[in-house]
Image: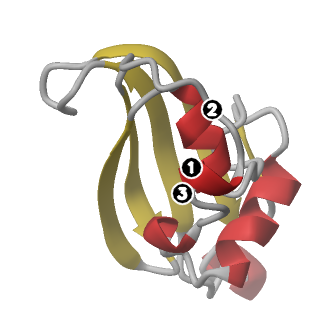
Amino acid sequence: MTSEADAAPAGLYPPSALVLTVGKGEHAATATVDRAVTLVCSPTPGGTHPAPAEACSELAAVGGDLSRLSGASPGQRPCTREWDPVVVTGSGVWRGKRVDWTARYGNTCELRVRTGERTVFAF
């Protein structure tokens, strides 16, 4: 016999779970993925990301819009002008809506500076 509690849905929250990658190359389709993590933000922070609670808070502050994780422009904080392109991606769902985002940066320093040195891509 199944109780009423057993029949209830596991949760009434929209899912928030992303796969984040950092790779070497100029385009996401051809980049060599160096690192990848999962980031689950709902119902509780988790996944393989090393700091899921902080990363989820940062994403919540920008409404899950990875393009809004911005920091200083490269000219405001020194980075080498070395061309060693880095491609980052975020794919999954944020509060029930599909996310498929890609950005390219000139090198890893530019990635850190342009994303505001946030935790989301610090893995």
**Residue occupied by mark 3:** 17
Q: Earlier in the sequence, mark 1 or mark 3?
A: 3
Nearer mark to the viewer, of 1 and 3: 1
Q: Is residue 87 above or below residue 85?
A: below
Cα separation between marks 2 and 1 = 7 Å
**Residue occupied by mark 2:** 79
The three-letter amino acid code for the residue at tag 3 is: Ala
24 and 50: which is toward the camera: 24
Position of 117 with respect to 108 (left or right) is right
Q: Which mark is residue 74?
A: 1
Residue drawn at 57 percent across, 59 percent down: 73
Disc 2 packing (10 Å; few <14; some 14–19; many ≥20): some
Residue drawn at 56 percent across, 49 percent down: 74
Q: Can residue 2 be spotted in the picture? A: no
Could you say whether the residue bearing mark 3 is in a helix, strand or loop? strand
Nearer mark to the viewer, of 2 and 3: 2
Is disc 2 in contact with disc 1, using a CB cutoff of under 8 Å? yes
Residue drawn at 66 percent across, 61 percent down: 72
Q: Position of residue 14 (x, y in %)?
A: 54, 82
The three-letter amino acid code for the residue at tag 1 is: Pro
Quarter of the rendering containing residue 8: bottom right
Is disc 1 in contact with disc 3, using a CB cutoff of under 8 Å? no
Q: Can residue 24 be spotted in the picture? A: yes
